[in-house]
Amino acid sequence: MAKGKAPEVKDMFAYLDTEEHRQRFPKLHINDNFMEEGRLATTEFFWRDHYAWLKDAGYLLRSRYSPGWSASWKGTSKSPFECEDGVMSPAGVVMDATRLSDGSSVVLKQCDRMHSDASLIAFREVFIFHKFSTDPLASDPRNHCISLTEVLHVPDDDAMDIVVMPLLQSWKLVEFSTAGEVVDFISQIVEGLQFMHEKGFWHGDVKYNSIMMDASPLLIDDVNPWDPEMTRDLSRDARFRNRTEHPVRYYWIDFDLTGEHDPSQGPPLVEPKYGGTRQVPEFEFPEKCNPFAVDVWCLGFFIHVYFMEGADNLHIKKRRGCEFMLPLVSDMMNQDPAKRPSMDEVVRRFSDIKAGLTEWNLRARFAACDENPVLRIIKSTKHWSRQLMYKSRGIAAIPRPVHRVNR
């Protein structure tokens, strides 16, 4: 793994065994032999000890945390990482579970109410979750903030709550095949950030892994919650549908650096808070800055890197198919924050861009610029055959996902 590069989800099992993970989560590695010996990490004891309570509350943890669990790989030649009950969360405060009422997958997150910087951040995040998960904001189709499903109060710990959220997946789990699919993605994320800004909130950490998707329309197989490229039992690669036929909805997550501004208090100037994107021009000078303008720059940078020009140092390839975004993205990344468009302007200009695209622009392949020429011909032939079939069936070039309020 390249130094400083966040692991892909598919590399997570290997990542658990690296020095970087040991340094970030030392409590998980007090005894490095716990997996081979079929035991839980120290940070997993909480989930084992609350298995029955969580089940009574309507959430079933995997067999790894059930009473009397015995590791399935013991006495075999299998690696723990080849077995479903060998899968553990990369961080002990977060856990996957199944909601018994409907069989849906959820994420459980510990929230410690003791007075500390970490708890203050957690409670600010819970407040924002609750704000955007409650009507009238929850029912607004422009709302793309991950929802808070429930807060459980741990019965034997007055300082601990469990936050329940839907289990989402990385937007990169399935490749984008057309410019129209990318247009839908960008439409949703700019709309979602505009909605936050309109309600007086800046995100504060706009980057590639602050956006997730409800991948359920794309799933043919039941996938593993921590390695979604594999089936749940890790027996084989998972299969997926495409976004054009099966539209998905995208969500903003990670509100630990999010803040709120009251317009009556004057210009929104705050001390810089360094999230995952450090190249912001304002961050070169330790002065107060407009966090809404920072969001705009970071969003432009994200689109520029991941959907247009790429970045060699991040191992992201240059792409073709979305060159029409360049003028808007360039303005979003203006060095002078006062000259950047607001998110209202970004949404308006992007709507104008969409209106000027032909159906064939939108159905064009979204692919790497350095693609092998022979492979490009083969893939393009298959691609356009499929697009003609979609057109004949009346399937739109821009996917149109249904807004669902998560509860």
Image: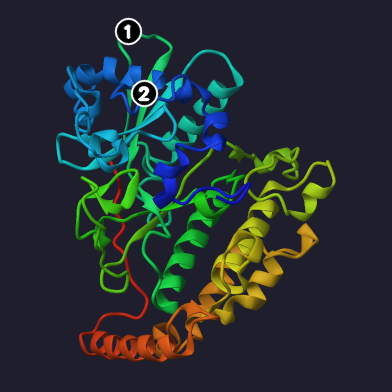
How is the protein colored in the picture? rainbow
Q: Secondary structure at mark 2?
A: loop
Residue 388: image location, x then y, percent: 28, 91
Identify the mark nearer the N-term, 1 or 2: 2
Residue 400: image location, x then y, percent: 32, 69
Residue 2: image location, x then y, percent: 59, 51
Q: Residue at x 36, y 41 (%)?
A: 135
In the image, is 38 to the left or to the right of 146?
Answer: left
Distance from label 1 to label 2 (Cα)?
27 Å
Circle 1 or circle 2, nearest the eye: 2
In the image, is 336 to the left or to the right of 160?
Answer: right
**Contact check, label 1 and label 2, Cβ < 8 Å:** no
Q: Residue at x 37, y 51 (%)?
A: 169
Determine which quarter of the picture holds residue 262. top right
Q: Secondary structure at mark 1?
A: loop
Q: Which amino acid type is marked by label 1?
A: Asp
Depth check: 325 or 191 in front?
Answer: 325
Q: Residue at x 48, y 16 (%)?
A: 113
Q: Residue at x 27, y 43 (%)?
A: 82
Q: Which amino acid type is marked by label 2?
A: Phe
Q: Which mark is residue 156?
A: 1
Residue for badge 2: 34
Q: How many marks?
A: 2
